[in-house]
Image (cartoon, coloured by chain):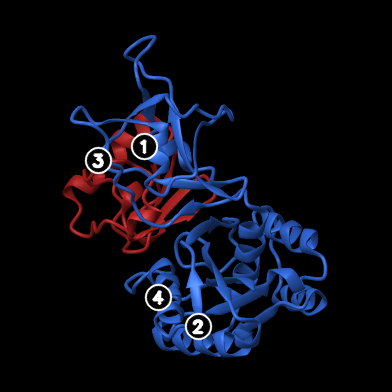
Chain colours: A red, B blue
Amino acid sequence: MTPVVGAGSGAVFVGSVDSEGDLEVAAAIALTCTGFTRDDDDECYVDGDVPTCFNCRARRWITGGFTCMKGLLRG
Amino acid sequence: MRILVSIDDTDDADSKGTGEIAEMLAAGLAGQGLASVGRVTRHQLLIHPDIAYTSHNSSMCFEADIAESALEEVIAACAERLKAESVESSDPGLAVVAVDRLVDPARLVDYGRSAKQRVISKDEAYGLAGELGVHLSEHGGTGIGVIGALAGAGLKLSGNDGRFKGKFNLAGDERGIGTVAQIKRQGVDSVRTLDGHTLGEDECVRLGDECKLVLCDGVAVLMVQPSDEGPGSPWSLVDRRALKSF
């Protein structure tokens, strides 16, 4: 099941970088996202250059996950 | 004289990051001949809906060695640069700690640890800074960056929090393997496992293209894990995700 809850600017990714399943979903979203920009390396938690929401400059961490500051999260 | 310079809330989603500004401050002090500076560390603070952070809620801190007489000049130089480099919509805060003049270092460390666990007010930050003799100032917006700036200094002072800014490319032999002794000649103070085991000088580590260092016991530590290649194989670098807790 997708960890994305809600829609539009209110969408939230409920998940963790420690979950392989959540990593797969975040990578799939980022792969086709027009707004993906890799954050400063010091803020990235996933190794490598493959796009993932977990490393995106537009994600804002919240308790238990993150939101997309560009409102681009899609489940 | 040993000081800690810590900043927070300097950026927005599209600007240069707080870590980059911390490096600029450090380079500026060194360039003016005011300080010999150490590396910048990043300190994660509490993620909570009542905290108005940009995206990560982390603060950045570096250590510097300055002349006793230069403290006010250093503070002024940092404040000026911080104000110039922070974006207009941000709420930057600056903390400068003269470590040897601290009234009660343990209270600053406790405050830093608290900032990872509970919401703290600006009044509390200013109150503690005043009691401990720490410089704390705000340089735009709401100035709430003072809360995290003071926390970053406390966490750095603890010696057991944070990751060093930047990636480190450690050289090994032609197979990409280096001994701990070789690694320690490249700016790493210690090589350890996540459960606290310190590797001996002759032990070998398979080095990747890049690695991150964390602050443990006041030194820069490279974290490794047993290799899945079997007994006798070189240690492996830990996955970046394993460093999330630092």
Q: Which residue is mark 4?
A: B27
Query: Which residue is the site of mark 1?
Result: B182
* Circle 2: residue type: Leu
Q: Is residue A20 above or below residue A41?
A: above
Q: CA distance from mark 4 to mark 1?
A: 28 Å
Which quadrant is home to the N terminus of chain B?
bottom right
Cβ–Cβ below 8 Å for labels 4 and 1?
Answer: no
**Res. B109 image quadrant:** bottom right
Q: Which mark is residue B81?
A: none
Q: Secondary structure at mark 4?
A: helix
Residue marked by disc 3: B209
Q: Could you say which is closer to the camera, residue A3 or residue B20?
A: B20
Give, as a three-letter code, the residue at label 3: Asp
Q: CA distance from mark 3 to mark 1?
A: 16 Å
Please, which chain is the residue tagged with disc 4 on?
Answer: B
Q: Residue at x 51, y 77 (%)?
A: B35
